[in-house]
Amino acid sequence: MSKDDRILLAHGGGGQLSDQLIREVILPRVGEQEGEALGDSACLTVGSEKVCMTTDSYVVKPLFFNGGNIGKLAVCGTVNDLAVAGAEPMALSLGLIIEEGFATSQLETILESIGETARSCGVSIVTGDTKTVDAGAADGIFINTAGIGRLRYPNLGLDKVQVGDRILVSGTLGDHGMTIMSLRKDIRFQSPLCSDCAPLNGLIAELMEAAPNMRFMRDATRGGVAVTLNEIARGSGYGVIIRETDLPVAPTVRAAADMLGFDVLNIANEGKIVCVVPADQAEQALACCRSHDLGQQARLIGEVVCMPEGETPWVEMETKIGGKRLVQMPYGRELPRIC
Amino acid sequence: MSKDDRILLAHGGGGQLSDQLIREVILPRVGEQEGEALGDSACLTVGSEKVCMTTDSYVVKPLFFNGGNIGKLAVCGTVNDLAVAGAEPMALSLGLIIEEGFATSQLETILESIGETARSCGVSIVTGDTKTVDAGAADGIFINTAGIGRLRYPNLGLDKVQVGDRILVSGTLGDHGMTIMSLRKDIRFQSPLCSDCAPLNGLIAELMEAAPNMRFMRDATRGGVAVTLNEIARGSGYGVIIRETDLPVAPTVRAAADMLGFDVLNIANEGKIVCVVPADQAEQALACCRSHDLGQQARLIGEVVCMPEGETPWVEMETKIGGKRLVQMPYGRELPRIC
């Protein structure tokens, strides 16, 4: 980046520009080794134990939405990051940055959601920090949570992915993102949109029992399933083919996305995982999801394929009308402040 | 707090109001058990290991100051919180919230400080998250770091404090806070103010060798030494007496504090610890500090005393002119956005 460059909103969108910022600006300065991944979570050796650690800041706007609020989101997001890494989430830290003048009653509602959500998934808030900034210096409240957990499933990784593996999504796509966007645009539907924001550690524990050779899991948040699928292709070196007809999308989300001109593949989810599962355990994994409250709309949407010699790994979608199109890594400007 | 209450800047000041917010609003909602301390750091059992975890958000204004910047601060603060808890800092997470339009060159400088400071104290940045918000929705950049470390000295705690123990400070008071305030007020001195922002894990490791029966350590940040001393009194149930003539204060800091009407006891430090050390190891601890780069101005400033029957534990200062005054817990509005 040149000397006069400035940060754009899209640098936080989870797409190509985020990726560039992390690789070109952040990692060379704070990473331990060149090219080291500063991933969604890290696994550390502490004495005789393997401990996973992750962090996320939450800047969602508006703070309250159907299905949750910034507090619920801050617990779910970090719990899910740990769970998809194969860790059992244990403890969260809670960092609050609050703008002067923020209503204490709103803060109380957010804190109640944090407490309830943490208790519902068996995680403790163990340490915290509260900072205030002058009116106009923040947008109500920003929350950071960091989480740690004991590594329980060490055999997950993009290096485990094999040709023929199936791609599973645990439910409908785009619910969180379209809920936020419709609120911002003040668009209402007869059957209201609702964020899918939920802690997935329970579902994931059951999934790992049902499909013990699971290769890889990721919660498809900023940038949607398109980001996750591209990361699978890039990280495994294989191609990914998905079928548009198999994508689970709620009718209202579909309508809202069409109306606002969004591709559901690029829209954030806050309670959905994408799994790469070996073909011979795919049906068990699917059945397991469907028997769980948070996975009833699960679907097998595609598979991992060999790349033609010399091609960069891509993600391709077989469209409804029988064509094919590339599913690209989104640029990042789609949905600012979605989480 | 009543329904119409709003958050004040002083709620983030680290004093009485912060304390009230944590006890009355935050803890009852997110804590595990009633009255449980959501301390500066927590100690967790992970399998067979004891792991400490801590977090802090950094909102200092201005972002750059003599002696450091928000990035250096974000590493030092969290490393120090772990070290004073008796843990060996191992890994940090890094959460960035950046305002649209922030200069990439400034971000790069901040990230370089983060990387350098982390390397200098043997800690890795292992995971991170970057969020952007629209112009006007944040104040340049806010940083959160969370840290974990292996518990190395499990015998520290306010319950270990005994009558007769000595109070040691590792160096001059108020350097960080007065540096920031003078910048904001645009006041300059012939010998410039400089923040004491520094990672203290190295000094603390040496101190624990020199004084293995150390009772308690705390880095005296927001609210200054006054907060730490009051926490020692409240947490141990004993009184604390300090001597004004023994307080180490740099002449320029003294001049700036007098000019601006601050009490150095209430001013934030970012590279100083307050220790409670048994009397028979106090001289060794002092000598150890003074032989370390970061502790050359260390002083024994007071001691732990019995409280008269029925009195709430207090902190008292013998003044220069031979009088006595209470050192109160500051209210919180002294120095907003100091770290």
Image: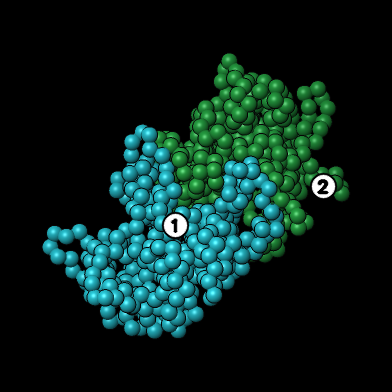
Chain colours: A green, B cyan
**Going by the picture, which residue comes out furthest to the left?**
B309
Q: Nearer the viewer, residue A273 or B308?
A: B308
Residue at 31% across / 81% down in the picture?
Answer: B281
**Going by the picture, which residue comes out furthest to the top?**
A190
Query: Residue B15, percent across and down?
Result: 36, 55
Residue at mark 1: chain: B
Residue at 53% across / 30% down in the picture?
Answer: A65
Query: Residue B260, percent across and down?
Result: 44, 63
Residue B332 is drawn in which quadrant?
bottom left
Q: Nearer the viewer, residue A142 or A89?
A: A142
Instruction: Please indicate whether residue B58 sits to the left or right of residue B39 in the image.
Output: right
Residue at mark 2: chain: A
Asked if residue A252 is positioned above or below residue A227 in the image, the reply reads: above
Q: Nearer the viewer, residue B314 or A31?
A: B314
**Going by the picture, which residue comes out furthest to the right?**
A310
Asked if residue B89 is positioned above or below residue B29 in the image, the reply reads: below
Please tell me whether mark 1 sits on a helix, a strand or a loop: loop
Q: Which mark is residue B120?
A: none
Circle 2 sits on which residue?
A: A312
Query: Residue B302, percent across and down?
Result: 29, 74
Query: Residue B256, percent across and down?
Result: 46, 68
Instruction: Please indicate whether residue A318 sits to the left or right of residue B19 in the image.
Output: right
Residue type indicated by callout 2: Thr
Q: Nearer the viewer, residue A146 or B132?
A: B132
Asked if residue A210 is positioned above or below residue B184 in the image, the reply reads: above
Q: Which mark is residue B335?
A: 1
The Cα atoms of the two marked residues, 1 and 2, are separated by 54 Å
Which quadrant: the N terminus of chain B?
top left
